[in-house]
Amino acid sequence: MNDQVARMTAERVARTSYGRLVAILAAVTGDLESAEDALAVAFERALTSWPDAGIPDNPEGWLVIVARNHQRDVWKSSAHRTAASFDEQRAQAPEAAVFITAAAMKDLDPDAIPDKRLELLFVCAHPAIDPAIRTPLMLQAVLGFDAEQIARAFATPRTAMAQRLVRAKKRIKNAHIPFLVPDRAAMSERIVPVLEAIYGCYAIAGPAGAGAATDSSLEPSRSAAATRPDSLAGEAQYLAVTLAALLTSNAEAWALAALITLSLARASAHSERFVPLDEHDVREWDAGMIAEGETYLRRATGQGKPGRFQLEAAIQAVHCDRARTRLTDWAALETLYAALLLVAPSVGAQVAHATVVGRVAGASAGLALLDELGGAAAGFQPYHAARAELLSRAGLTAEASQSYASAIELADDQAVREYLEAQRRSLQHG
């Protein structure tokens, strides 16, 4: 067994199971920092042990055993007993936890207890935790994203986000917030940040642009890892569906399940390059997933005033309907985006609305709406991409080229950057 194979296996487990393992390790004590530290030790030992001893049949179970044993050693150490309060020692005492021996490893299946992640999501939405940090905390502690990824998603400096996350974890530990699934009433009170975290998981992990449901007219076609069952985007869909089934009558939960499922249905197109959504070959879309997503959306309708995720899922459904009609109903999209702006106004929704208006009423009308955003969208990459496309259609080549340059500079994804560069070159040679 060579080091590279061991490292690749460890990286795969970290990518697909990190949040699940942290949830298992933190469930007893409520100490997220301790769980993360113990898991880090387990991964280090895996990289030194697996090349010689071989990769275990259940890598996740192996990591949990090593991490829990490390936690036990820390709790028993004299340094810890000296530093920890009596209450902390009592909460962390070995008899308060169920430690797993090597003989029981074969029976440990983290996939068999997926509700641990949902449990921890609701813990992170506890009223004692600052509302502004709840969703970022879930994305890191439960879903495994690092501070840099989360900071980028929230347009926040990395250092500031990292500090806020550390403070939130200490708050959970010091307040002795229990790791218990709240009753149904409390779950309803905490549902909004939980839904936001699951959606954020898909938005960050999914194929480039696929998470930007509010900018779906610019969505790419990629053969993303997001379509694989072990991917984080696939995990986001699983969590959304599981949560909706748990709550049964929560319209926004079913709508989120529909939104992610319908978006993933289009990610199955086998292309490694960026392709605008209206240029997708609909024959490559997953008809089964579209039908599944539409079923979830029907579960979400008829339950009062539609919320953000219901409107975004409806937008995705309109795009997916092109697989049947071969046409995009731009007028329906304009209506849905206008409603979305009333329910959940955001720069992304405004940019997407302007793009759709540009299709319905002409490029000038779309540009007028983008102009209303002013400096609020200066650092928002889709704004510059949308503006460039509309300027190009309006025949304003020089201005379009400048907007493409701004969009290219802000693009994180290489495939998106290559697409935008090609569009800019076509202006210069057109």
Image: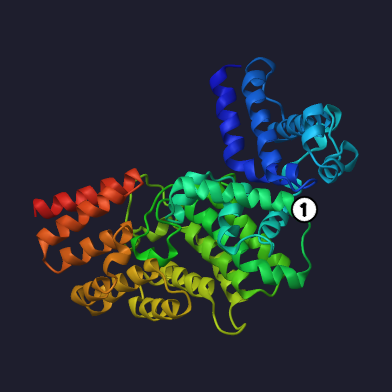
Q: Quadrant of residue 255?
A: bottom right
* Spot occupied by residue 235 in the image (x, y as percentages of width and height): 60, 51
Task: Give the quadrant of the C terminus.
Answer: bottom left
Which residue position is annotated with label 1? 176
To which quarter of the image does residue 69 belong?
Answer: top right
**Looking at the picture, does residue 120 appear above or below residue 259?**
above
Q: Residues within 10 Å of mark 1 (few under 14, many from 20)?
A: some
Q: How many marks?
A: 1
Q: Which residue is more in the foreground, 22 or 128?
A: 128
Judge whether 237 appears above or below 21 on screen: below
The amino acid at mark 1 is: His
Q: Residue at x 65, y 67 (%)?
A: 191
Residue 276 in the image: state x and y as whole percent: 32, 58
Q: Nearer the viewer, residue 140 or 59?
A: 140
Q: Residue at x 29, y 60 (%)?
A: 378
Residue at the right extreme of this rendering: 95
Q: Is residue 135 above or below residue 254?
A: above
Q: Residue at x 60, y 42 (%)?
A: 16
Q: Quadrant of residue 400?
A: bottom left
Horizontal and vertical percent for residue 312?
Answer: 48, 70
